[in-house]
Image (cartoon, rainbow, N blue to C red):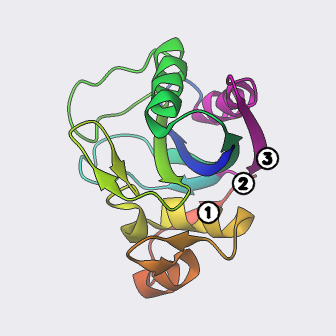
Amino acid sequence: MTVSAFIGLGANLADPRAQVLRAFDELAHLPQSALVARSSLWRSAPLGYADQPEFVNAVARMESALSADELLDELQKVEAAHGRMRSFANAPRTLDLDLLLYGDEVRSTPRLTLPHPRMHERAFVLKPLVEIAPDAEIPGRGSAAACLDALGDQHCERIA
């Protein structure tokens, strides 16, 4: 049995556009998984720690037979291969892969919260998500499109 999962991709160091494009290719080769859709690339301003370059963001849709924890393990391996360092919250990064949605699973553990706890507040997640899954639902929040409409005008522009 496979589950639809959505992955948020973001980078703002070491040629961010190339980092995200390479990550799409790597997601396509994860075990027991298939990359079934990938969004355009989007540019957004950093949140939290503002003294850093803009981000390149995207969302991927996967079909996976891996559990949510196994998928997270695989995502963290890809991040590590890109030289991801976790120096402080909202720090610049070569690659960030967030498990946004895993089917309709809802959970909160020290390691993983589903759906991603702030995805409904971020245009750089919602715009590419709605692009590839216009009917996407965020458990406990409603439609991704409605969440995006509620944000107003957060800076996030399609770049490719």
Taking the magenta stretch, the answer to whether it contains residue 150 is no
Real-space Cα distance between discs 2 and 1? Answer: 7 Å
Looking at the rendered image, the disc whose residue lies closer to the viewer, 3 or 2, is 3
Identity of the residue drawn at 55% across and 21% down: 78
Which mark is on residue 129? 1
Say which residue appears at 74% left-offset and 23% top-offset.
29
Residue 12 is at least partly visible in this image: no
Mark 2 element type: loop
- Asked if 26 appears above or below 48 in the picture, the reply is above
The first of marks 1 and 3 along the sequence is: 3
- The amino acid type found where label 3 is placed reads Val
Residue 31 appears in which quarter of the rendering? top right
* 152 lies above or below 77: below
Q: From the viewer's perspective, is 90 left or right of 35?
A: left
Q: Tell me the quarter of the picture where residue 87 sits.
A: top left
Asked whether disc 3 touches disc 2, contact meaning CB atoms under 8 Å apart, the reply is no
Residue in the image at 57% along x and 80% along y: 145
Q: Circle 3 is placed at which residue position?
A: 36
**Disc 2 target residue:** 39
* Cβ atoms at labels 1 and 3 below 8 Å apart: no
Q: Is residue 88 left or right of residue 1?
A: left
The disc, 2 or 1, on the residue closer to the chain's N-terminal end is 2
Furthest residue to the front? 1
Callout 1: helix, strand or loop?
helix
What residue type is disc 2 on? Ser
Residue positioned 49% across, 37% down in the render: 97
